[in-house]
Image: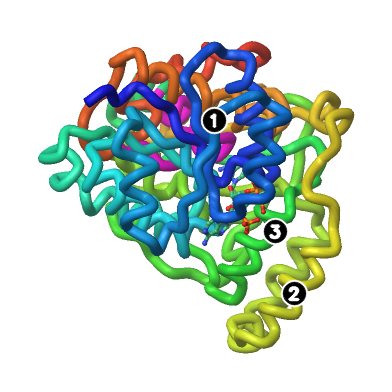
Amino acid sequence: MNKSKLVIYGSYGYTGSLISEIAASSGQSVVLSGRNEKKLAEQASRLKLEYRKAELNHPEEMDSLLKNASVVIHCAGPFVHTWESMAEACLRNHCHYIDITGELGVLESLKSMDALFVKAGIMVMPGAGFDVVPSDCLASQLKDKMPDAESLELAIFTSRILSSRGTLTTIAEHLGSGGVVRRNGQLKRVRSAWKSKKVDFGRGPVSVVSVPWGDLSTAYTSTGIENITVYMAMKPSLIRMLKFSNLINPLLRNRLVRSLIKKRIHTLPAGPSAEHREDGQGLIWGRVINSGGETVESGLSTPEGYTLTSKIAWLIATKITAGNLKPGYQTPATAYGNDLIFEVEGCRKNE
Ligand SMILES: NC(=O)c1ccc[n+]([C@@H]2O[C@H](COP(=O)([O-])OP(=O)(O)OC[C@H]3O[C@@H](n4cnc5c(N)ncnc54)[C@H](OP(=O)(O)O)[C@@H]3O)[C@@H](O)[C@H]2O)c1
């Protein structure tokens, strides 16, 4: 069987479209896929690529999609609803899997299936986007600089907080769930906005707040550091709102409230314009500390988050089609090393 095709699932979503545009000029054998045939046909004719409609909850359709595929780039989020069907279809069809999630629960669930992936001979790498590739590489670089590090802090800054509808819907999906940190190797539930502080990404101090992001899983896998806190840059007024949200968490978990929030999100633009992406930038800061209280600090700059996601996800997928892969669950750094991020134009160290 010729398993040479590269499938982009969720290809007509905001981020899937960016990846599909890169794919169109690549010369690779690409199949666009998703559940809406009309949108797929329009996109495929515009980009001059093959397409195949497949519903995630329809195993026969998924098997026909993946039986000739070497790798799928899974872009259909929120991934909490989609990862499992896709991972099972990949196992059945011996197809490598990458996705662009930053959802902690999804990363942990896929990690727990490592033995199944090894047995099937497939590589599974969730988090192949802005969150978590640069932060995963930075965490591993810091661990190399301080092998006896006992704790790690990561902070993520985007110069323009413009999110796609898909990102906002994914945030809405997890509203009211509180925060998470890693302590002594275990994930520990904490209040939303549990810690806030100032971090200097290289342009003076910026307010950041702790968030339950996917790095709490991947940075632990890549470095073995048992105490991890992840922060994102946020205006102090929003941090105050996030702290207040602890009082209304049960309300935010209410289905009706979530569906009203999602309806409102659907009235917003699909995502940042090309100009916003061109102007935007991502900054990542990290610090490790050892038992003696010594610290090492470092930072990275990247292109805007959606641009970086499309480029890095595509880069990883093409490494896989070229046979450069490791079977089993992988983080970006465990599969490709600390310097993977520097393979994308515009990514550099801030020191
Ligand atoms: N880690 C990162 O840095 C990063 C970066 C970018 C995006 N993301 C994540 O990637 C996801 C997509 O973002 P986006 O901006 O591209 O969102 P989007 O524009 O809303 O696109 C989502 C795509 O997923 C499809 N989809 C959703 N649920 C599906 C299901 N159950 N079955 C089949 N298809 C389904 C949608 O198809 P329909 O139109 O048919 O519903 C659409 O094609 C979000 O979870 C976002 O948080 C993460």
Side (left or right) of 79 relative to 105: right
Q: Which mark is residue 261?
A: 2
Side (left or right) of 346 relative to 82: right
Q: Mark 1 or mark 3, which is nearer the start of the sequence?
A: 1
| Mark 3 → mark 2, Cα distance in angstroms | 9 Å
- Using the image, determine if residue 322 lies above or below residue 243: above
Q: Which residues are magenta?
A: 124-140
In front of the other: 205 or 19: 19
Which quarter of the image is occupied by the N terminus?
A: top left
Is 232 a magenta residue?
no
To which quarter of the image does residue 78 belong?
Answer: bottom right
Side (left or right) of 199 relative to 69: right
* Circle 1 Cα neighbour tier, 10 Å, few/some/many (<14 / 14–19 / ≥20): some
Q: Are marks 3 and 1 in contact (CB under 8 Å)?
A: no
Q: Amino acid at mark 1?
A: Glu
User: Would you name the residue on which mark 3 appears?
Assistant: 168
Q: Secondary structure at mark 2?
A: helix
* Circle 2 Cα neighbour tier, 10 Å, few/some/many (<14 / 14–19 / ≥20): some
| Mark 3 → mark 1, Cα distance in angstroms | 30 Å
Q: Is residue 91 visible?
A: yes
Q: Position of residue 129 (x, y in %)?
A: 54, 35
Which quarter of the image is occupied by the C terminus?
A: top right
